[in-house]
Image (spheres, rainbow, N blue to C red):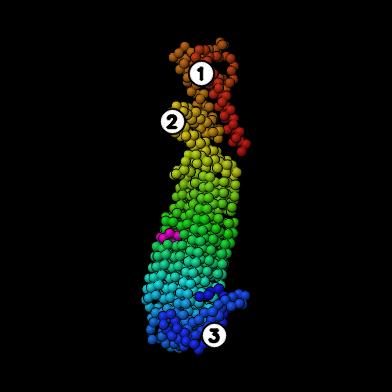
Amino acid sequence: MIREYSDYSVEIEDQKFTTEDGRIYPKTAVVTLFAHNKKEAGRELFGVIDTATVYKMINDCVPIVLDNLYLNDFSLSNYRRLYDLGKKSPVLIASLSAKNSFFDSDICNDFSYAEFSDGEISFEGTNFAKGRTSFTGSKFGIGNVIFSNTYFANGNIEFDGCSFGEGDFLFKNSVIGNGQKDFKDIQFGEGEVSFANTEFNYGEVLFINTRFNSGRFNFKFARITGGKIDFHYSVFGNCEIIFERTEFGNSRVDFRTVDFGTGRVNFNRSVFGNGEISFEGASGSMVKFQFRKAEMGSGRKCFNLMEMEKTELSFEKTIFGSGDITFLESKFRSLSLRSCHLDQYIDLRLSYTSILDISDTVVRDIVDLEPFDFPVRIEYLDISGMRLIGKLYLDWERNNVSRIIADQEGSTLKQKAEQFRILKENFSETGKYSDEDKAYVMFKRYEAKSWITGQKEKGGFTGFVSYLPYWFQWLVFDAMGLYATNPVRVLISMATVYFVFSLIYILMITFTSADIISSTADQLGVAARSFYHSAITFFTIGYGDHFPVKAARVVSSIEGFMGVFLMSYFTVAFVRKVLR
């Protein structure tokens, strides 16, 4: 069957036509097909059957075989008028086979409100050459319904309101012209629904409020030039849903409030054009929902209010184009944007997710995680390997940043340190200096932990000796001043050191031969001498009215160094706070 043509002509000849299965018809239809350049593209021969004969077969409830036949102006609406039936009265059709047939109608190839008995119904390889095609309100029994390799020259086809029994509904490898493809309000039975490798061309493809049962829904390699593809309010059961490598063209893609059921959903390597993409309010309890290596255009991408708490949603290596992306108040088990280029504003203020993976991404605009009027619950956040050219909006306290990175499973200490470093630089850019300090402290802590872990793995003397600089760094840089981010902590450390040295002097004077001697007539008690000497030593005042002897000289030297160090430490921490 030749399907690539722009026009055709039909000539009825008084010549017998014999089908492959031995049926004989008195006339032959010679259909000449013309290409777009008006040249002849080929000829097809069909047996000729008139509609009156088909209407009688329907009325007699006998099986109808239209394989390899030419049929002009077939219409169940005309049949109802002929037999005085109501406009929507069901017409019982015992069985129907119309393989490799040619339907020709000025207005409509009308099968509306037909009621097909159990058994296979096939239009495989058929050519609906002219007029729209309507199966509106028809009921199909148990058995396969086949429209594979079918050509609808007029792209207006209507299956709205149909119901199907158990069996497959196959539209594979079909070609549909420009127009509206209406599959609204259909009730499918268990089995495969397949539009694999179907060309929809331009127009609206409508699956609004359609019910899919268990089985498989296959849109793999389907192609849509542009217009709209609309699934909103549709419901899937335990159904594998495949849109792999589907080309949506510049269509508006609408999956709002779709219940995807419990089967796996696959949009891997699908290609979206510049139309808007919306999955707002979609739900489901499937385990996997994947958009890996998909390509999207400049339209807005809306994934708001999705209810998929058991679902792992993955956009790994997806190209998002230039339109804004929003996941506002959605719920997922996990959400992965790993290895994506995020060149636009992306709203990741999720209502809940156990894992948010935005690692190895390149961010050139804003990634928004900061709660506003509702809590953002993210259990684990992974930003390791992120190239942050833009800005990351989140709040240390309300996003619980320390926990959602520290509690990551599977990431190394070095990776966690790197993530805190990224956040430190980000908070500096966004003017959140208090959060910057907290991120910097966590970065230095995990950097130190990563270093000591590496040293321990070396083992032997090297591993043992490494603990000395590690604990020194912890005590002096971390415990005493949080890496110069907390001047109050440094002041407390200064007071503590001063008090400890004062007590040491008291103990030395009381229990050893060491002493603090006055060079003046003013004689102080042991405690007063100790605290006074500690003060002038710690702050390096050195009046000379009291001086240490014996072992107290060594302790005083150490305290003098500690005083200079901690005062410098405080100055750095204080100035750092004030200048920002």
For residue 11, the mark is 3
Q: Which residue in the protein does label 2 denote?
A: 459
Determine if residue 335 is in view: yes
Q: Residues within 10 Å of mark 1 (few under 14, many from 20)?
A: some
- Number of other residues with Cα within 10 Å of mark 3, as a class: few under 14, some 14 to 19, many 20 or more: few
Nearer the observer, 267 or 496 = 267
Residue 212 position, x and y percent, is 42, 67
200 part of magenta stretch: no
Query: Is the residue 29 above or below the residue 271 in the image?
Result: below
Which segment did they paint magenta?
260-265
Mark 3 and mark 1 lie on one chain; the one further toward the N terminus is 3
Tell me how many marks there are.
Answer: 3
Callout 3–callout 1 Cβ contact below 8 Å: no
- Residue 244: x %, y % from top left: 49, 61
Asked where in the image residue 168 lies, by quadrant, the reply is bottom left
Q: Which residue lies under the disc numbered 1?
A: 555
Which of the labelled discs sits on residue 537, or is there none? Answer: none
Q: Name the kind of residue labelled 1 in the image.
A: Val
Tell me residue 373's x, y (percent): 52, 52
